[in-house]
């Protein structure tokens, strides 16, 4: 009986602990020449702290892609791909750029990490 009580207490205690989750962000490319990376509140990302981030990428155009590159990160969707991808990335201090590989001079933004 005591073992059962201890196990129940341990499970309840573990469930009560706050989970450590990666920060979440939302990327979008297309339609048109839209390319953004935003926080959950809708604000555009210009600076982030270093660490693990979860990015939901919504690629809405067959003629564009979302390509994130910077220190230790080089992730992209395929140009013909339309749909959603979820990435977990670890950002280090430095500058990160996200572009459309087809239109790198017009569809490009960057943010700093540090």
Image (cartoon, grey):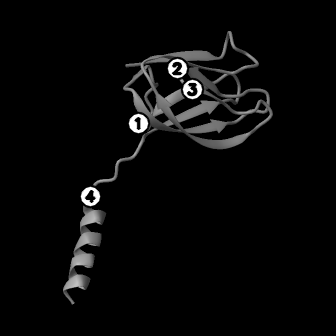
**Residue to which mark 2 is pinned:** 71
- First along the sequence among labels 1 and 2: 1
| Quarter of the rendering occupied by the C terminus | top left
| Residue contact between numbered discs 3 and 2, judged by CB atoms under 8 Å | yes
Image coordinates of residue 65 in percent, x first then y, are 71, 28
Task: Report the mark closest to the observer, 1 or 4.
Answer: 4
Give the spatial CA distance, label 1 vs label 4. 25 Å
| Quarter of the rendering occupied by the N terminus | bottom left
Report the side of 29 relative to 6 (left or right). right
**Residue to which mark 1 is pinned:** 41
- First along the sequence among labels 3 and 4: 4
Residue 73: image tag: 3
- First along the sequence among labels 2 and 4: 4
Image coordinates of residue 60 in percent, x first then y, are 70, 36
Alpha-carbon neighbours of circle 2 within 10 Å: few (<14), some, or many (≥20)?
Answer: few
Q: Please tell me which residue is depicted at 76% across the width and 37% down the height of the picture.
A: 81
Give the spatial CA distance, label 3 vs label 2. 6 Å
**Residue to which mark 4 is pinned:** 17
């Amino acid at each position: 009986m005591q073992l059962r009580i201890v196990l129940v207490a341990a499970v309840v205690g573990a469930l009560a602990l706050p989970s450590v989750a990666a920060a979440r962000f939302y990327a979008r490319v297309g339609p048109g020449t839209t390319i953004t990376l935003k926080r959950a509140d809708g604000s555009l990302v210009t600076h982030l702290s270093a660490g693990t981030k979860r990015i939901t990428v919504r690629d809405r155009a067959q003629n564009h892609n979302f390509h994130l590159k910077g220190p230790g990160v080089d992730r992209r969707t395929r140009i013909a791909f339309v749909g959603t991808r979820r990435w977990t990335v670890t950002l280090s201090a430095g500058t990160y750029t996200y572009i459309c590989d087809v239109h790198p001079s017009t569809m490009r933004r960057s943010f700093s990490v540090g």
